[in-house]
Amino acid sequence: MRSYILRRFLHLIPILLGISLLSFFVIQLAPGNFLTLMKADPQVSKQKIAEMERKFGLDRPWPVQYGLWLKNIVLHFDFGYSFANKRPVGALIRERLANTLLLSLTAMVLAWGLALPLGIISAVRQYSWIDKLSSFFAFLGLSIPSVFFALLMILFAAKTGWFPIGGMESLDYDSLGFWGKVGDRLHHLALPALVLGTGPMAGHMRQMRGNLLDVLRMDYVTTARSKGLSESKVILRHAVRNAINPLITIFGYSLASLLSGAFLVEVVMAWPGLGRLTVDALFARDLYLVMGGVVMAATILIISNLIADIMLALADPRITYS
Amino acid sequence: MTSIITGAVAPMELPAELEAAEQIARPPQSPWGIFWREFKKSPVALAGGAILAVFYLGALFAPFLAPYGMESQSRELSWAPPTRIHFIDAEGRLHGRPFVYGHRMVSLAAKRYAEDQSVVFPIRFLPRGEPYRLLGVRLDRHVFGVDQPGRIFLFGADLYGRDTFSRILYGSRISLTVGILGIAISFTFGLLLGGIAGFFGGVTDTIMMRLTEVLMSIPGLYLILALRSVFPDDMPSDRMYMAIVGILSLIVWASLSRIIRGMVLSIRQNEFVTAARALGMNRLRIIVRHILPNTLSFTIVAATISVPGYILGEVALSFLGVGIQEPQASWGLMLSQAQNVSVLQRFSWVLAPGYFIFITVLAFNFLGDGLRDALDPRKVR
């Protein structure tokens, strides 16, 4: 197991190199030279440009630039400088990544917190009104485009005034006490997390329902019933435990898909996350910021997939990795 | 009595009631017969298919069905609300033909309009309007419309006073075809390259799989946007359309060819492949004629459920302002007007294309679900 994990980690290195090389190449293909763009910007000091040229070889061919970019990351953990934001890329990404993770994790908690109980109830009460209703909403939830859903929620917030329209904190955020800050943050989180979490919630719910229905037909469930256990014990102790196993792997992958899904929600609902940062950077042709954003997003995706695989290996003794 | 090949019953040899029993016991067994029999069982899948048929016909006949052209503006009616259709006029008289009233500006600044009840515009069937070309024929009849200067906006108007309903119809020509064209491209490449990688293995396989791994490790929209930045911002609409289809196909291609490769790896172990090889068949021909057809039921379902991905990709790009450009219409581009909260709040009909996107995605999911059930080979029949 340990050697499997180690091997998977080593495997990350060529993939990340491939991703960064591909994105560097693609961005170089884009029309418009950002060096001239930057030199034309009076707000970027000559000194800074000279420093960047020395450090990143901005006037050299792109393979050299890529090599220098990589060297700076490996040796100094320096991701370069964002010309549009006038700040180092590393700090910017750290800050925005935290916001994206906050949004994704909240959506995840929401999705799983609702999906599991609803899935269990739908399976236990198959074909009851609650099953039919949740199946119906699951289909809607799986199909609603996040852009459209986000716009509907903004409209809802604007019409009722119950929720803030976009953004992450109120204007008076800094003057609030600790609990005020938590409350304000949650208030802003509610709608984006709902938009982001609905699709996964619907998916997990259907999955839970299907798994549990399969398990309920098993002989050991009949055995448990016939030895006189209460129905709640049969379901929670015997059936759900087995039905939940396949969902453990989805747990890891769901984080990965939430991170990609967060992109559009962030842009539409003005949540200052990594997706928004990368879009703005792309429009501004802010090379190092785009690179940092793409590579960071890919890293998280790969790591969550890795976690999913490891969790699967831990959860299911039948799977061996040698 | 029964022909092994066709399953048909020779009528002369059986009494009528026995013949009927025989037919019930032996329904048609051709693959398409089985498929259709199973598919019919799912009303939602049929409904999904029917909705899509209506939408795609709507896209095909857009210029005829739309009362106005895609770019036809009436600036004095900026953000006019959906026009109400009446049967009974202000004096309480019943009209045989439904009609609309004229528009009267209430507030220019707030873009508020009221009905001008002094003028009545009956809704005409097949009136002459803006000329257009449909399937190569020059026509000027539209399915419905009102006389000038009346205007009928079923779903309201946008900033330039363009009819949202007409633009949704024209926009569907882009938004709905992106997916069809996209799967045609990505499935051709995905099947072929996945098949080759799985069949030949070795270096080809390794290179392909590493490449797809890299492509799949970048979260979808980040990759789409990075690739989009390669193209200039101000491309003509038709080339932009092709660029979008190409980018989206590249992304779907990666995951698809990995799955196909896996399937080919197991199919090539079959004896019929060995037999074909022993007969000296060309290897590409073995892949195309013997191996890939075995992935068909998967491919059909996967194609159906991947269409929404393309539609949403186009929506995302156009919504972000880097996809289809004005004055063209596409559902994502039309929806991007709703990014302005005050517009969204006052003129909520800007969301109309959103409902169409939603219904389309829902219909494809319904259809895909029905196809999956109908094509499932493990299902007991």
Image: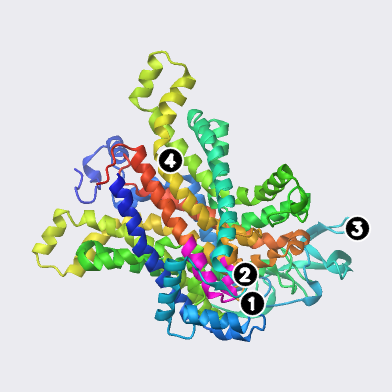
CA distance for labels 1 and 4: 45 Å
Start and end of the magenta stretch?
A278-296
Q: Is residue B234 left or right of residue A208?
A: right
Residue highlighted by disc 3: B91
Query: In terms of depth relative to the viewer, which is nearer, A68 or A128?
Result: A68
Residue highlighted by disc 1: B326
Tag in front: 3 or 1: 1
Q: Are marks 4 and 2 in contact (CB under 8 Å)?
A: no
Tag in front: 1 or 4: 4
Q: Is residue A247 left or right of residue A184?
A: left
Residue A316: give x, y in percent of width and height: 33, 38
Amino acid type shown at disc 1: Glu
Residue highlighted by disc 4: A247
In terms of sequence position, does the residue under pointer 3 or pointer 2 come before the other? 3
* Secondary element at image label 2: helix
In terms of sequence position, does the residue under pointer 1 or pointer 2 come before the other? 1
Amino acid type shown at disc 3: Glu
CA distance for labels 4 and 2: 37 Å
Colour mode?
A: rainbow
Residue highlighted by disc 2: B333
Q: Residues within 10 Å of mark 2 (few under 14, many from 20)?
A: many
* Secondary element at image label 1: loop
